[in-house]
Amino acid sequence: MTAAPVAGAPPAAGWPRRVIVGVGLAILSLGLVFWPPGFALLCAAIALGGLREFAQLCARKGNTLEVPVAVAAVTAYVVLTHFRLIHRYEGTLLATTLVAALATAMLSGTGGYVARSSSTLFGVLYLGKLTSYFVAIRAIPQIGTAATIEAIVLVALTDIFAMLVGKSMGRTPLSSISPRKTVEGALGGLAVAMLAGIAAALTPWMHALWWQGAVVGAITSFGAQAGDLVESALKRDASVKDAGTLIAGHGGVLDRFDSYLFGGLAFYFVLWLIGMIPHGLWVS
């Protein structure tokens, strides 16, 4: 999302459609924050949509996932987190996932048992566990609604301003993994997220100090941009431009929500770090 300008490139086609779809998704997501079961269902849908695309990326590399096992485990992650039981059953869930993936791979008799079960477990952690952090944020006592909205907004602002700054003044490549992303864009997204974090901290809903808001904004932005790079690495490894085509103007589910996977984890972690989440809460 930190694209450097390309000399002589024509204006991007489909921008109105992309904006309309993006705004629609934002309204849907923010609206469901006020209804926890609906928000959990949305998170499950995003996780399962992303899992489908992840399985396709793996298949391009000749490494098939045990999809039924992964679907069951990803769904279980979201459900257990929603009912605040994940801390009690996560170990059992992961062990069962690994054993079930190995068993189904061996029963197929097509070889690659370790690779297939390992990829299945990775997909469950990447899509199931990381997505469940947004469900956990929503369930934080007293501040869950405000915190979830803040997390969504911080990631969105990081994406938007990293892209805008990168397009307008980006010159220094950020990583060979995604050559169009720039250092200037990354810093622009980081700066705006920090300012937004400070503003959120000063609202009566978050009850935080300004410097805590800056830290929350910075770490969340860093996590969001790391998530973007991870998904770029997965696509680069599979030699594809987009992970899918499900979301008009945005590519696939992973293309649209990659930043939120690591962004949610980072946001939850930094709230715990500064003492805004009770120690021993239900997410490990």
Image: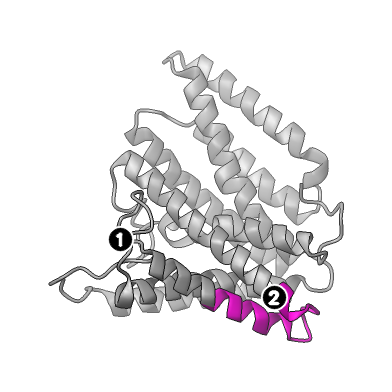
Disc 2 crowd rating (10 Å Cα; few below 14, some 14-19, many 20+) is many
> How would you classify the magenta stretch by its main secondary structure?
helix
The quadrant in which the N terminus is found is bottom left
- Left/right placement of residue 135 relative to residue 42 reads right
Front one among 135 and 271: 271
Front one among 250 and 110: 250
Of the residues under marks 2 and 1, which one precedes in the sequence?
1
Q: Amino acid at mark 2?
A: Gly
Disc 1 crowd rating (10 Å Cα; few below 14, some 14-19, many 20+) is many
Please state the horizontal and vertical placement of residue 126, each as a whole percent of the image: 56, 45
Q: Secondary structure at mark 2?
A: helix
Q: Which mark is residue 180?
A: 1
Residue 210 magenta-drawn? yes
Residue 43 magenta-drawn? no
Circles 2 and 1, Cβ within 8 Å, touching? The answer is no
Please state the horizontal and vertical placement of residue 261, each as a whole percent of the image: 56, 55
Up/down of 71 relative to 145, above or below: above
- Left/right placement of residue 159 relative to residue 62 reads right
Front one among 262 and 246: 262
Q: Secondary structure at mark 1?
A: loop
Report the residue at 79% width, 86% height from top.
Answer: 204
- Left/right placement of residue 149 relative to residue 247 reads right
Residue 71 seen: no
Residue 174 seen: yes
Q: Which residue is mark 2?
A: 213
- Left/right placement of residue 44 relative to residue 16 reads right
How many numbered discs? 2
Up/down of 144 relative to 222, above or below: below
Q: Which residues are magenta?
A: 192-213
Q: Amino acid at mark 1?
A: Arg
Q: Distance of mark 2 from mark 1, alpha carbons?
A: 30 Å
